[in-house]
Image (tube, helix red, strand yellow):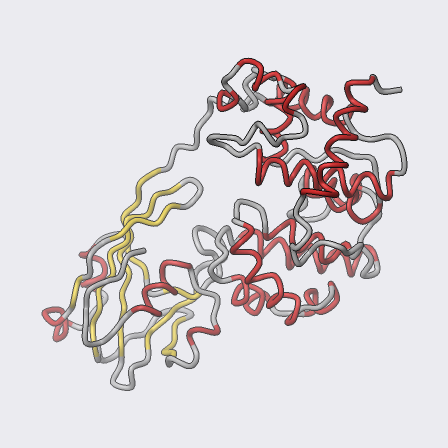
Amino acid sequence: MRNTHSQALSDRVIGWQRVHGRHDLPWQGTGDPYRVWLSEIMLQQTQVATVRAYYPRFLSRFPDVQALSAAGQDDVLSLWSGLGYYSRARNLHRCAQEVVTRFGGVFPGNAAELATLPGIGRSTAAAIAAFCFGERVAILDGNVKRVLSRVLGIADDLSEARHERALWSRAQDLLPDAEPMTAMPSYTQGLMDLGATVCIRRAPACAPCPLSDMCVARREGEPERYPVKTRRIRRMAQQLWLLHALDGQGRVYLSQRPETGIWARLYCLPAFEARHDLMIALPEAVRDTVTEHTAFTHALTHRELHIHVVTVRQPGALTGPNGAWHGPDQWPLLGLPAPVRRFLTAFEPASPALPGP
């Protein structure tokens, strides 16, 4: 039996969500695990506003897990292009195939089995199970960690596994007991909504928060101290030179990236580690005609790419592994890294200046 504090917390979150929470998100109001799973994967490290645009397009192309399983990976990457963190798309495709082959096209109905699928971690599995099957299981994404660590006053460093495990245990203890099929979706969504709209990272809106009078962080007057996480991602700087080659028909030369490494399997401008390497790849007759654009930075999870784009027109013979010429009606349909797509979209032959990243 839970204590009265836990009961009050879950009751308040549920009541607040039903009145003040978000109810207009396109993936809400469904018990379809395919749609919930798709939204949860898309929302990982991606803003809701961005996912709103991608989610309906993805569903239109792949309306169910069978359609996604049967698709080619290049088609999936093409539709994912611009969302970033492309390992999510590759795992999404693999997961759909395993749901079909291992579970007959039906998502398993509990978090433990869901977590065995590619790309589905503990929190994502719990979200699917709570929303679709009413399972009494805790989620712990970034928003929920922030809400719970502030309310409970957890000052332990959550970058340490033992402290995160302890928070998982506390989160499980707070779950509502009664009517899980209705309470769990509201409670789970409520914690997400509080973290996204009220208990935000900086300058949280404590006054309208339903948990304000029981929040340790508010009582201390320093809510932004929580959650404590001292380990920071260190990005390694890397120079990347991209060859923007145009032929006499205005087509651009793109090659498919390797199976591993950054932008795996995406179509990309030919990439080189140094300017010298790029120039050597060009016929000698056109090396003096290139246009070098202003470099810009693109951040990945563990790398900070300093990207230099070099344009050359009518370069003559240009061949390479997995490469081909693509016209303006073709390359937008390919899976492209976000900075490459932005460059190609904004590039104007009359103006060689590179737009901002």
In the rendered image, the vertical position of residue 191 relative to residue 133, given as above or below: above
Question: Considering depth in this image, is 144 or 13 the residue closer to the camera?
Answer: 13
Percent position (x, y) of residue 62?
67, 68
Percent position (x, y) of residue 207?
58, 28
Question: Considering depth in this image, is 293 or 176 the residue closer to the camera?
Answer: 176
Question: Considering depth in this image, is 247 or 129 the residue closer to the camera?
Answer: 129
Where is residue 5, by image quadrant?
A: top right
**Residue occupying the point 53% across, 45% down:** 45
**Residue occupying the point 27% across, 65% down:** 243
Percent position (x, y) of residue 261?
45, 50
The N terminus: image quadrant:
top right
Task: List the single residue furthest toward the front.
Answer: 207
The C terminus: image quadrant:
bottom left
116 relative position to 145: left or right: right
208 relative position to 344: left or right: right
**Residue occupying the point 68% across, 38% down:** 123
In the rendered image, the vertical position of residue 44 relative to residue 102, given as above or below: above
Where is residue 2, by image quadrant?
A: top right
Task: List the single residue furthest toward the bottom.
Answer: 249
In the rendered image, the vertical position of residue 110 relative to residue 231, given as above or below: below
73 relative position to 23: left or right: left
Question: Considering depth in this image, is 75 or 323 the residue closer to the camera?
Answer: 75
**Residue occupying the point 13% across, 69% down:** 287
